[in-house]
Every structure is written in structure tokens, then in C-alpha cells.
């Protein structure tokens, strides 16, 4: 089935050689996406590329030392740790026999993966291997450094496209995406890859933050100021459901999170405003303001019903 996400500029087909001299990489090409995602996230979270200094700032502010000080290091996205909690709860409810092999697609700096694995373990399930897959080499390098510092031998970073993961077929028990869905220009292909990776009966969990539209309409231009085209892609809800079916998923459950998400972002905005000085001290003044503006823009789209935040779970047939 073709990728149903509108305005995609071509499939994200995995890492490879850069464009020829003088060529311009398309927004949806691997080279184009690597550059676009790196530039966007470096502008939003430049401090994460110097994570040791950032950790010291977090410890000074929160009093959390060691691994705990880094668990939420890059969890300033739309849903933050609360979105990861939803994923962990879904995995725990699904259960499973024996240690789990899990994977996050679009894992970024690895904060969501580490946080979610810890939550799953605290909930009584054992995780044998956790794979984080991200297209941007700089993100993977930061995540590897943090994993080494925390002694996380069971967490492995894979620098690859989410549509071409170098893992065997039917090798995973759970695949999840915590908020990265809008960063995939070809979400249908990503879902087919998730289906390939999962064992029969395996669980897929998606937190859809700013990736789903009720129909085929675009979000507002005000939203695009902080969520630029070429970095954020949207898909109609019915297109997402068709892609899940086409990828071999059954027992699909779509949970509308609008009321939950509006309340969450309202609370997060209060915290960002109250502790603006501390956030600026950790992430930088520009990042603090951009985080605020990003949350405000998403909340406005939820209230206007131009975007539908959701939790989606499905089982591999």
C-alpha cells in the first residue's frame, strides 16, 4: 500500500551516500531528512550535544544524580515522560512470556527509550535487548555516549532508516514510537517495516502527538512556524488505519487523547513559564522560548480539532 501521508517528498529509504556535488537533497530523501532533522533538533535542543554539561545543570536544578539525572534529558517534547508512561503501560498490559526484545523507531537521543525500558522493568517485565533506531548519526552518537555512561549494555543504537532496519525478520516482541511519527515522511513504509520486525502476536504502540489530522486538511500556518514542513509530516487518521491493516496489524485500538493532551500541555506550559529561568539555564534562552512556543502551537491545534492526538496499539497477525 502506498504511503498515505500528504505532502511527502519521497520515501525515507535509509542511510546512504550523500547527494552528488551540486545536487539538492529532497525533503523526504535520506540525506535531506538527516539534515532537516539534525538542524531542527539542534536548534530546539543544542544543549543535548553537550550532554555532560547539561546533566550537571539538571543535577543542580533537580538534585537527581547519576542515571536518574539523565532519564528525562531529551523528554521536553510534546508529551514528555507522560507519553512514555502511556507506552510502558500498554506494554505491561500486553505482557508476554520471557524477556522481551524491544525497539523504538525514531529514538533520537535515546531518552525516551531508556525511560520506557526502566518503566517496563519496574512494572515487572524483563527486557533482554532494547534497540534504538534513528536516522541521524549525531543523535546516535550522543545516545551511545549516554548509554556507556549509564552502563546500559542491553541498549543498542542503530543508525538507520526506520523503513530499513538491519535486524532479522520476526526478531522483536514490541516496537514503539514515542512521538516521532510526524518525522517519518513515509509512515506507511515505516509501519510495514515494524510489521516485518515483529514476531506473530507482537505489539506495536504509537503515541501520535502532532501527526494525525481528522481528515486531509493541513494544520494552520501558525503551527508551521514551530513545526516546519519537511520536518513534520501529517497523515489523515483513516490513512493511518489503512496503513496498519496493510502492514499486517490486527486488533487496532485508537485512543483519542485530546482532553488528556490539552490538560497535559496546559500543565507543561505552566511549568515552563514558572521555571523559565531554570529551563533557560539548562537548555539556553532560545531553546526555552522555542519549547514554550512549540507546546503552545500544538495545544492550539488540539483545541481547534485540526490535529488529533492519540495512542494507537495493534498486534502483528
Image (cartoon, rainbow, N blue to C red):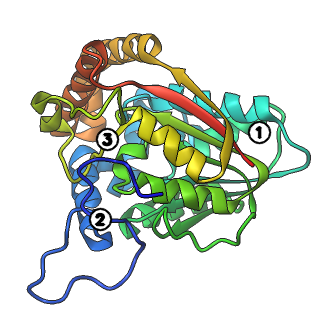
Residue 188 visible in the shown view: yes
Looking at the image, residue 58 sits to the left or right of residue 29; the answer is right
Q: Are marks 2 and 1 in contact (CB under 8 Å)?
A: no
Q: Residue furthest right?
A: 97
Q: Earlier in the sequence, mark 3 or mark 1?
A: 1
Q: Residues within 10 Å of mark 1 (few under 14, many from 20)?
A: few
The residue sitting at 78% across, 34% down in the picture is 94
Front residue of 233/250: it is: 250
Query: Residue 300: percent from the left, percent from the top?
Result: 23, 18
The residue sitting at 28% across, 57% down in the picture is 37
Residue at which label 1 appears = 121
Q: Is residue 25 above or below residue 294?
A: below
Q: Residue furthest bottom?
A: 21
Front residue of 288/120: it is: 120
Q: CA distance from mark 2 to mark 3?
A: 14 Å
Q: Is residue 209 above or below residue 21?
A: above
The residue sitting at 43% across, 10% down in the picture is 259
Query: Residue 288: percent from the left, percent from the top?
Result: 22, 32
Residue 63 visible in the shown view: no
Residue at which label 3 appears = 234
Q: Residues within 10 Å of mark 2 (few under 14, many from 20)?
A: some
Front residue of 314/103: it is: 314
Secondary structure beneath dot 2 equals loop
Residue at which label 2 appears = 10
Amino acid at each position: 500500500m502506498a504511503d498515505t501521508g500528504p505532502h511527502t517528498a519521497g520515501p525515507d529509504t535509509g542511510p546512504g551516500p550523500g547527494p552528488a556535488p551540486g545536487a539538492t537533497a529532497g525533503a523526504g530523501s535520506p540525506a535531506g531528512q538527516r539534515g532537516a532533522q539534525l538542524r531542527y533538533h539542534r536548534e530546539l535542543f543544542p544543549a543535548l550535544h553537550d550532554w555532560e554539561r547539561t546533566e550537571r545543570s539538571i543535577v543542580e536544578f533537580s538534585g537527581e544524580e547519576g542515571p536518574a539525572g539523565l532519564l528525562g534529558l531529551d523528554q521536553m517534547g510534546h508529551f514528555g515522560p507522560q507519553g512514555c508512561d502511556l507506552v510502558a503501560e500498554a506494554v505491561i498490559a500486553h505482557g508476554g512470556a520471557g524477556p522481551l526484545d524491544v525497539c523504538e523507531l525514531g529514538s533520537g537521543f535515546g531518552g525516551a527509550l531508556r525511560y520506557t525500558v526502566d518503566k517496563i522493568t519496574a512494572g515487572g517485565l524483563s527486557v533482554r535487548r532494547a534497540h534504538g533506531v534513528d536516522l541521524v548519526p549525531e543523535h546516535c552518537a550522543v545516545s551511545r555516549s549516554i548509554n556507556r555512561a549509564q552502563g546500559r549494555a542491553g541498549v543498542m543504537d542503530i543508525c538507520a532508516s526506520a523503513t530499513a532496519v538491519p535486524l532479522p525478520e520476526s526478531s522483536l516482541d514490541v516496537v514503539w514510537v514515542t512521538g516521532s511519527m510526524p518525522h517519518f515522511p513515509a509512515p506507511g513504509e515505516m509501519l510495514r517495516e515494524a510489521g516485518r520486525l515483529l514476531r506473530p502476536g507482537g505489539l506495536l504502540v504509537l503515541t501520535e502527538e502532532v501527526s494525525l489530522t481528522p481528515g486531509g486538511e493541513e494544520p494552520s500556518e501558525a503551527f508551521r512556524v514551530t513545526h516546519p514542513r519537511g520536518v513534520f509530516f501529517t497523515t489523515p487518521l483513516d490513512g493511518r488505519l489503512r496503513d496498519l491493516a496493510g502492514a499486517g496489524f490486527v486488533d487496532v485500538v485508537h485512543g483519542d487523547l485530546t482532553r488528556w493532551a490539552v490538560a497535559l500541555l496546559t500543565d507543561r506550559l505552566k511549568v515552563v513559564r514558572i521555571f523559565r529561568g531554570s529551563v533557560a539555564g539548562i537548555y539556553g534562552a532560545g531553546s526555552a522560548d522555542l519549547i514554550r512556543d512549540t507546546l503552545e502551537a500544538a495545544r492550539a491545534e488540539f483545541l481547534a480539532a485540526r490535529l488529533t492526538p492519540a495512542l494507537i496499539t495493534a498486534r502483528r497477525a
